[in-house]
Image (cartoon, rainbow, N blue to C red):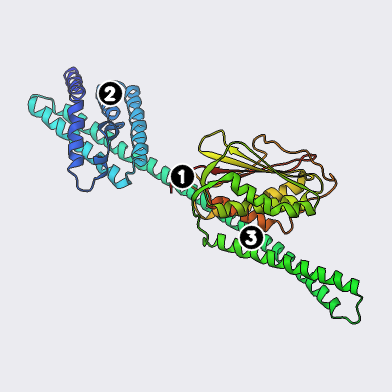
Amino acid sequence: MPNHESEIDELADHIRDRRDAILQSWRTGVESDPALTAASTLTRAQFNDHIPEVLDNFERSLRAKTPRQEDSARLDQQQSAADHGTHRWQQGYDQRQVMREWLHLQLCLLGELEYYAQGHRDLDASTMRTARIIVAELCGEGVAESASRYARLQQSDAAGQLRDLEHALQQLDELERQRVRFWREAAHDLRGNLNVVASATAMLNKNPIPDDARDRFLGMLETGVKSLHALLEDLTALTRLEAGKEHREIAPLEVGQLVGDLCTAMQPLARERGLYLDTESGPELVVDGDAVKIRRILQNLLLNALEHTQRGGIKLTWSTAESSDQWVICVQDTGPGLGGQAKGSLASALKDATDEAGAVETMNANTVSEVVDAAPAATLPSESNASASRSISGEGIGLSIVKRLCELLDASIELHTGPGEGTTFRLRFPIRYTA
């Protein structure tokens, strides 16, 4: 028995000294296997992974003199094999490839034992039998632990995919409810305008009708037709955006000139409502952008601001952002501000379009983000009646158009508002476009 133990210890010394050669022999066997292709893409350290620890545990098993030492080596071997399975999963191996790697390791170790036996022909037969049994147990447990770890990883991955699918279905359900609600509101606005037109038309068809009443009904009819025309144009524009029919046309533009021309065109409407429409900027700012679409975005926001501001007015400011790759423009009004449910409704209207897009495809790094009170922003004090409630009926379409256009231009839009304050929309655009 002492002779057997000393022979086992000498064999363990041999395995320790030959570890690098065994690892190289294992890699050569794997690389020559046509069924294994993943190994060629790994560095030596990535390929060896936990197998050096497995060889250490083989050596410890050979040297074990007590059941406790054997159990300790076996537990460490199981952990090393499981960790190896995890890493091979992360490296893109399938389960069959991992099993074949273990087979090649077993063949290498058995070959090493035969090589050792040929140089030590006086070995006791029980020494090599013990070593072969330990190799069989070591590689068998390696296969079992790797397979077990793969099964758990596959189950975890499948569970994660199921959760992602369920979450995506919930998002689609919510988006469908939002879409139905949105079009219901649009239909309500259309019906309202049609009722005005129908009522005015019916009154004009009555005879006799006083001249002052006729003028009043003609005014109602004209207003109703204009509102219908504007609403149908908005719906058409939104449909084109959602269908991907709009494309950005990037060219150099001077922000001050674009904003100045727009404000000049809208000054009569502001004066009609008794409001000011001011601009404030720094030095000349030349950027890349789609002038037509930026003008549409600002026009929608200005029309909303003019509609909901009772006293005071609207101010537009623009400048480069803190980061040199963006420029910022703010549309500020002295309206009643938003709070509570009204603010939540407006914020929801702002983000619906982006949420829909995000549920259909993964957004890239330049995709629109929406921020509601995320960072301090200058707001004008409210000069309007604080008790006035700001309704978003009819303006949800305009805000959806704004959001879609911002997405198309890789821009972001932020809403800052509160009771006793006006409302500020802050937009961030890239200064340059790479494509």
Q: How many marks?
A: 3
Q: Earlier in the sequence, mark 3 or mark 1?
A: 1
Kindly identify the amino acid type of the residue bearing the numbered disc 3.
Answer: Arg
Name the one closer to the observer, 414 or 354: 414
Q: Mark 1 = which residue?
A: 156
Tell me if residue 365 comes above or below residue 245 in the rendering.
Answer: above
> Mark 1 against mark 2, which lies toward the viewer?
1
SS class of the residue under badge 1?
helix
Tell me if residue 2 comes above or below residue 398 in the rendering.
Answer: above
Tell me if residue 257 comes above or below residue 20 in the rendering.
Answer: below
Measuring 31% from the left and 40% from the top, which residue is drawn there?
143
Measuring 74% from the left and 38% from the top, which residue is drawn there?
380
> From the image, which quarter does the N terminus lie in?
top left
Measuring 87% from the left and 74% from the top, which residue is drawn there?
214
> Mark 2 against mark 3, which lies toward the viewer?
3
> Mark 3 against mark 1, which lies toward the viewer?
3
- Within 10 Å of the Cα at label 3, are there few (<14), some (14-19), or many (20+) other Cα atoms? some
In the image, residue 95 lies at what x, y percent?
32, 46
Name the one closer to the observer, 114 or 245: 245
Q: Mark 3 = which residue?
A: 179
Q: Marks 1 and 2, Cα distance to the nearest angstrom?
A: 33 Å
- Within 10 Å of the Cα at label 2, are there few (<14), some (14-19), or many (20+) other Cα atoms? many
Q: Any mark on residue 60, and which? A: 2
In the image, residue 390 lies at what x, y percent?
78, 51
Q: Marks 2 and 3, Cα distance to the nearest angstrom?
A: 67 Å
Kindly identify the amino acid type of the residue bearing the numbered disc 2.
Answer: Arg
SS class of the residue under badge 3?
helix
Kindly identify the amino acid type of the residue bearing the numbered disc 1.
Answer: Ser
Classify residue 152 as left or right of residue 408: left
SS class of the residue under badge 2?
helix
